[in-house]
Image (cartoon, rainbow, N blue to C red):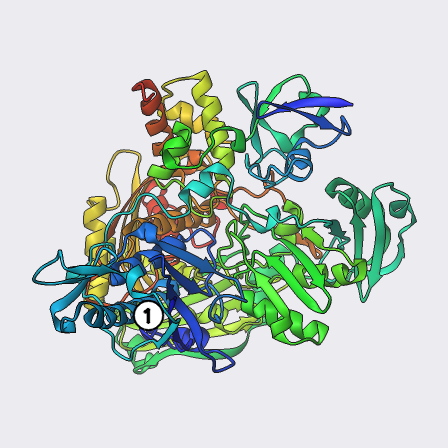
Amino acid sequence: MTLSIVGDVQVGFPAVRTGYGQQTYGNTSPQVERYTWLTVGDDGRVTLFAGKVEYGQNIRTGLAVEVADELRVGLDDVDVVLGDTDRVPWDMGTFGSQSTARVGWQLRKAAATARETLIALGADHLDLPASDLEARDGRVISKHDPARGVDYAALLEGDPRVEEIAERPAVTPSGEWSVMGQTHRRRLDGLDRVTGRAKYSQDIQPEGMLFATVVRPPAYGGRARSVDPAPAEALPSVVSVVREDGLIAVLAEDDEAAALGARMVQVDWEIPSGQPSRWDMPAHLVESGTEPYPMHEAGDLDEGFRQADHILESTYYLPYIAPAPMEPRATVAQWEGDRLTVWAGTQRPFGLRQELASIFGIDESAVHVIAPEIGGGFGAKSPYALAHDAARLARIAGRPVRIAFTRAEEMMWSNFRPSALIQIKSGFTSDGRLVAWQSDAYHSGERVMIGRRGAETPYDAGNVRSLVYRSDSPLPSGSYRSLGAAVNHFAREVHMDEIAEAVGKDPVELRLHNLSEPRFRRVLEQAAEEFGWSGPHPAEGRGAGIALGIDVGSYVATAVEVSVAGREVRVHRVGAALDCGQVVNPEGALNQMEGSIVMGLGGALFEASDFQDGRLLNASFARYRVPRITDAPRIDVRLIGDPETPSTGAGEPGIVPIGAAISGAVFAATGVRHRELPILRHL
Amino acid sequence: MLTVHVNGEERDTPRAERNLLSYLRFDLGLTGAKYGCGEGLCGACTVLVDGQPLRSCMTTVGAVAGGDITTIEGLSSGETFEDLHPVQQAFVDEQAMQCGYCIPGFVMGTVGLLNRESSPSTAQIREALAEHMCRCGTYQRIERAVERAAQMRSGGAS
């Protein structure tokens, strides 16, 4: 038989600190259903089921580590099923660094419930009181006589058994962990990734599949006035050119014919005029700003400025940047009667299922979405509209249809990290104590949450007013690692450096001078120690900078050392500290921190998406520079979370302080303050 | 009909002008080499031709017809960790990966590098891999993996 542990998807622990997290990531199912979270088979193998997807964050290993420990089995005894809507519990989506914090906790409870159930079965089997028994190495054994015991597998002969996740199962305290908290260098999927066996949505090829290329306008908002498909239809491998409800697509027997056909479809495009171009953005953000939302209001701002010895006003600007994951989006749709199967590398398989059901007027149960391995996403792969197109085309063609973005399509038709302009006015005493903090942040994009993340100041200003405006977005704005948090942090932390300069204090000292929350103080001190902070001038020709922050409930601080030669900035080394509470898979957390730092380095130094009159000007890696191995610094990260504090996220916080730290280091090296990114454009 | 040698096997190809990456991925089903940019700028499509790295997205089957093509699938049987090529083992042991999409390309690029230079300096490693992109930013680990692989090979790992 199989032991199944079931529960609902109300995974509300631990509470996310900010209102933003509570609103956005309250992971509540639209239907109240019971889902199987975990099974123990009569071969002793354990399988966990989660609606999260694997897009590099190594959550497959992270969740398996938690389950293995609670069930007292080896990591190799655990199988992991992710992101398959027919098999896993409903999930809102993989974003916001919630996988360990929420789903991991739910799975730990499920596994602890399974362990308690197995011990109860063992008590019957061994005719011993359960209190005398413990689980170890896949067996239930007597605490007094470990030789007396029984394998899990032997306990599961007979009828299937279903248990609810217990209200308060005996989850293993961190002091007793043997798998959690340990360094696991070999991730569960490591072998598949180095052999090419790992299957991404780009790799899915069902029998009889057609290749489709969608004919897209050269500029945003473009509409076809007229279409001549004849030149494409004349190509030998082209099956048809579909035109339906604004969708123009070439279906072909091979990928090259589809791409060539799409180029040969003759379209007369109507491009809307008057779209803002990149140089219009700073003014456009402010002029179109609406719905000021008070993120943080405290004290009396006017009184605060009256008390100030100095008042400092600065403006910060960040352009759009591209997520540019290595895997361009790809999808395959296949109809079998009225049942639809879609493979899509989306961060929201259940959201996509709902969209497809709605488009075709069918029940969600008739739609099966499978998220295979995902070649990076960084937040951008939440929307996945090409799967809608593939499903429409597959229905028309009566065959499975694949759509795969080219690099240029991925750059242009993805969603960008929003652009923002932030004005900060601070008042402080001559020894650098903040007495007033006024911030007005204009973030592009419809989703009001974009700019609110990270907009509260952690410093003890006393008199505070922090407003976040929603501004018009000429480019599709959307999720990106930490979203507006990295943007808001950049402005605030550079401003703190400016105050330090104004009063002649060290950047670390100035921050500590204004910080009372112990976790912030500690993470800053630990990062400074890890880095060996000795001030902004560590060596001849070098500059150092440091910044701190909070995202998804985790505290982070980062110090960097740079040198500047001509129009190049070289980041030599990075020292960082992360407090994300208890760490179940340290190697995973470290890898995520390192990756966030490298990604943030790109945005700080050279990344910017350029556009003019609705056209994206740098939709190629030849024109859009991302960090290469030659840009990568040495990175040392210290994980300092309290092992008794529930886990918070580790995938995003690392990107939050790095931009300001680099700006501070470049200032130390050159005397020039960079309030606009990317820095290389302003050297 | 044109024939090519892929992973030690002689294979037919219908058209000399067929894009090599498309041929490998869709005609032969060898999906280990990835499409990343189609412009030879990211390295995800890297395969070996006569032991040296080549951007398969930028060439045709006809252009490599005389050579021995090795894809990641042909590097080792890969059934268990012990079966892996030393470079693959080193990437696993350094956890030099996140999403893994770029990793087959990095592995092939590294094998090519070590074929040319058995104990490369840090500068040589960086120069050889500068044409590969890892957007997840695992470069520090990749560098360590290349160093480990070089040590494994020179240390006589049999």
Q: Label 1: state its secondary structure.
A: helix
Q: Name the amino acid type tagged 1.
A: Ala
Q: Chain under label 1? A: A
Q: Can residue A323 be seen at all in this image of the molecule?
A: yes
Between residue A576 and residue A515, name the one nearer to us: A576
Residue A133 lies, with reference to residue A302, above or below; the image says above
Location of residue A278 in the rendering, given as x and y in whole percent from the top left corner: 61, 55
Location of residue A13 in the rendering, given as x and y in whole percent from the top left corner: 32, 74
Q: Is residue B87 left or right of residue A303?
A: right
Q: Is residue A264 left or right of residue A323?
A: right
Residue A456 lies, with reference to residue A511, above or below; the image says below
Q: Give the residue at the far left of this rendering.
A: A144
Q: Residue at x 75, y 42 (%)?
A: A254
Residue at label 1? A110
**Other-residue count near label 1 (Cα within 10 Å), few / some / many at <14 / 14–19 / ≥20:** many
The answer to which image quadrant residue B119 occupies is top left
Between residue A348 and residue A632, name the one nearer to us: A348
Q: Can residue A385 be seen at all in this image of the molecule?
A: no
